[in-house]
Image (cartoon, rainbow, N blue to C red):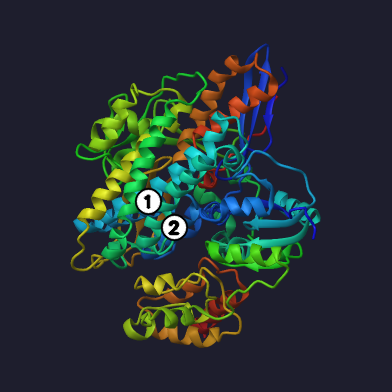
Amino acid sequence: MNPRKPSIAVYKFSSCDGCQLSLLNMEDELLDLAEAVDIAYFLEATRAARPGPYDIAIVEGSITTEHEVERIKEVRRDAKILIALGTCATSGGVQALRNFADHKVYASKVYEHPEFLHYLPTSTPIAEHVAVDLELWGCPVNKRQVLEIITALLNNRRPNLPQYSVCLECKRSGTVCVLVDKGIPCMGPATQAGCGAICPSNGRGCYGCFGPAKSTNVDSLVHILRNAERMPGETERLFRGISGNAPAFQMAAESFISKEKK
Amino acid sequence: MKNIEVPALARVEGEGGLFIGLQDGKAVEIRLDIYEPPRFFEGFLTGRFLQEVPDITARICGICPVAYQMSSAFALENALGIKIHPQVRALRRLMYCGEYIESHALHIYMLQAPDLLGKESALELAAVAPDVVKNALRLKKIGNQLLKTIGGRSVHPVSVCIGGFYRWADKAKLQALLPDLEWGLQAALDTLKWSVTLPYPDLEIDYEFVALHHADEYAVIEGEILSSKGISLSTAEYESRYLEKHVRHSNALHGYTVDGGTYLVGPLARLNLNHEQLLPIARKAMEEANIQLPLKNPYKSLIARAVELVQAYEEAIELVKNYSPEGTSAVELKLKAGEGTGATEAPRGLLYHRYQIDDGGLVQFAKITPPTAQNLPRIEADLFELAPKIVSLPEAEATLTAEHLVRAYDPCISCATHFLKLKVEEK
């Protein structure tokens, strides 16, 4: 057995900090985790920083500047395993809504001199720039899933992450379907499980923050949601949300627009 | 000594660096470089339906999402002329208590205390004082549990809507938290006693304090905007005095008063302006700890946070005990075109939102002024005042003292970066 503890580095790109915070929010496990691994670089938690290479890099955030394009390559070079943590890192996050709009208009809404800004016209996931070994979706990620990933890596096994949709979580918890029962538009059928179906259990529709589930029929959901719309544009805006840059949701929003035009 | 340079600030929310240019023992240049990229929230809020706004603005900050949800909700309710149910108001205050608890416990123990105890992190502190860190984590966890019980999860909770809540929080589940909350109140009182014993660097600043103020409660979700200069404004009048300047060679909008002054928002401002509204246990604890107000040392904002931690636990217990939801949890919305403002006290300070909506409830204009943007000019000004005191110190100590000052502000850099700042050196 190798007595050396695996080293972990945690990085932030364009994001809100909420996924890194999920590490600090492991109040019951944090001290044990710090025993089991060597937290070599984690600026939000510690001033002490050791240079790479590291065994595991955990990356929060999306790529939105030239500087980040270069920085993520360095992160990749320094790490054996790279984990993209959260919906910003896996799809571009809410800031990827700029990808479907004129970013110049956005910048001019906020800044008097947008020409001073340095940013890319798009927000993109980590995997568009470097090879990613493991993606964990969620805005924010579920800290249980973060723990599962780290534990799996420490034990050299495959992490056990759900591949089904939010619908199954509702069924398991006995939550009555908000779409069927109340006609509330819900992205649950097309969204990856992992949150615990917290939106339907709060009496509202899922808004897709865990990204598209594998092999779901998004077209069919678009059709159902259009019939359940409470106001014009509701379905399109649902898909143009937190995970709007995920290819399946992007295609759904686009197919919807082209149908409108016909 | 050479210049003081910290390329990447640790234990702050978001990414930033610090540069202090020294010449003949004086600071000639201060740069708080925030290289967190802009995310254009005001841009993509435009065209969204008002009910989607709290879900989007939450994503501005992972540590204080509730603050963003609350300021949005109050602003949009104000635009529609909605009066919320008193129990909704009480539940929002309770939810905010959860955020104060997790955010303040995180900042006190994990972000700032290591500086005062000569450690690099709370994890390093745990090696020598495991019980302190274990208690700190439990204090923080209870805040997160409160948020989870009300909002489904602690980061980006999902229960707040315009008009109220999507669903009432479960009364039995909230009451089940009471033993933890009672434990937390005692631990918070211990935190306050301990906080006044820490070795804070000397620095007294003559601040203009600005915070929400309410005659009947320690203002967090509602009140007038009060300045220590005696100026009181309604939320709707905020922009008549508090401006954002786009500084040449800087991409940040900086908060200034209309006459060009800097001002301070956050726990020091709140405590100094609103201590008379503290609940009895918090007030007594503050007196027993012999805390003399006004507190004017920025490092001692940790003490103000500790008082507020007691207040948040005390208030949470009261609100849980009195929680009695009845009727619908949200007012039905009657859409109309209009404009509304909302201001609440995020753990880091005053957070102001203004929206214009059309008659279909779609956002036409959004303006968000986060606390850290308002404090940025003040942090730089503090560093100028600090510089002469630290130039004679060994470089590592001087750097740490300057870094510590920035951390004491609990800057939320992700929040502030739709007011991105990237100073270009002009020589």
Dot 1 falls on a residue whose secondary structure is helix
Outermost residue toward the top in this view: B24
The residue drawn where x is 78% and y is 48% is A52
Residue tagged by mark 2? Answer: B154
**As shown in the figure, which amino acid type bears the numbered disc 1?**
Gly
- x 52%, y 76%: residue: A191
Picture layout, residue B414 above or below residue A208? above
Residue, x 49% and y 78% (percent of image)?
Answer: A166
Residue B75 lies, in percent from the top left, at 32, 52
* Vertical side of A160 occupied by B66: above or below: above
Q: Of the residues shown, which amino acid type is indicated by label 2?
A: Ser
Query: Circle 2: is it few (<14), some (14-19), or many (20+) Cα within 10 Å?
Result: many
Q: Are marks 1 and 2 on the same chain?
A: yes
SS of the residue at dot 2? loop
- Residue denoted by label 1: B98
**Left or right of A261, for residue A92:** right
Quadrant showing the N terminus of chain B: top right
User: Pointers 1 and 2 in contact (CB under 8 A)?
Assistant: yes
Q: Position of residue B393 (x, y in %)?
A: 65, 16
Outermost residue toward the front in this view: A1
Relative to B24, does residue B268 appear above or below in the rendering? below
Counting from the top left corner in percent of width and height, residue A176 is at 36, 82
At a point 52% along the width and 75% down the height, the residue shown is A193
Q: Is residue B12 left or right of residue B371?
A: right
